[in-house]
Amino acid sequence: MQLIDTHVHINFADFQPDLEAIAAAWRAQGVTHLVHSCVEPSEFADMQAIADRFPEVFLAIGLHPLDMDKWSADTAATIESLATSDSRVVAIGETGLDLYKANDREIQEQAFWSQLAIAHRLDLPVIIHCRDAAKRTAKLIQKFQAEVGAIHGVMHCWAGTPEETQWFLDLGFYVSFSGIVTFKNAQQVKASAVMVPNHRLLVETDCPFLTPVPKRKERRNQPANVVHVASHLAELRQESLEALAGQTTQNALALFKLPVIHDFAVSA
């Protein structure tokens, strides 16, 4: 059984003391690829160094909506230059909108639009962060598709309602679920997880955040725990873990144009 963790942040300081052991753990769980998302361009060199050590790590480049203090007239050009500088870049992001307690909506929207434009020009998917902003995010994507052209990608760490989920499915996006879907009180997330078509479903950890059940006592999440996200999703959707792992792996390979690994050694 193989799995792909489509959203990690293993460059964070939490992982530096024992990253080799963390890698051994994800390999033991059959995680064949990881997509390393980016919070701000300045961390890209550290992400590249990790990908140099672990060839199953692929990269994204972007600016998170909660880091608008780092957005400037040059940021878009920097992101585009970095995206074309390394063949391991498979996405733009994470980008998007976060309107939870936000007072910078206008600049968030400018930065989001600019990163959508980069993704469009480079024919790369976007990794979208969306918190308390589903309607506005959907409208901006719809406007971009109408005025500029095609854009595709994933709603990462999705926690929206079934109605909101349908908006993004209608726009052609994949939907990725994290450890949130395993939480007892996350009923709307569970309902959304059931309705996503098989061919649009992805799994992730968003580590080091959002450790899934049954590992909640471990403060630091890690890529190996994506198996628990997948297992819970399989139970919700009334299918086998093997089937869900196979489908989400194929979906991630297709969306991010990842190379197929035929000789990956996994645990029994």
Image: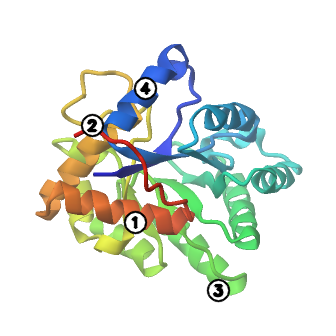
Residue lying furthest top in this view? 17
* Residue carrying label 3: 146
Neighbor class of circle 3 (other Cα within 10 Å; few <14, some 14-19, many 20+) is few
Q: Estimate the x, y position of residue 55 in percent, counting from the top left.
A: 58, 41
Sequence-earlier tag: 4 or 1: 4
Number of the front mark, 1 or 3: 1
**Amino acid identity at mark 3:** Ala
Q: Residue at x 43, y 81 (%)?
A: 170
* Residue carrying label 1: 250
Location of the C terminus (image quadrant)? top left
Q: Residue at x 36, y 29 (%)?
A: 25
The alpha-carbon separation of the residues under discs 2 and 3 comes to 38 Å
Seen in the image, is 268 located left or right of residue 154?
A: left
Neighbor class of circle 4 (other Cα within 10 Å; few <14, some 14-19, many 20+) is some
Please tell me how many numbered marks the rendered image carries. 4
Sequence-earlier tag: 1 or 2: 2
Neighbor class of circle 2 (other Cα within 10 Å; few <14, some 14-19, many 20+) is many
Residue lying furthest bottom in this view? 146
* Residue carrying label 2: 212
Does residue 51 appear anywhere in the picture?
Answer: yes
Seen in the image, is 252 located left or right of residue 214?
A: right
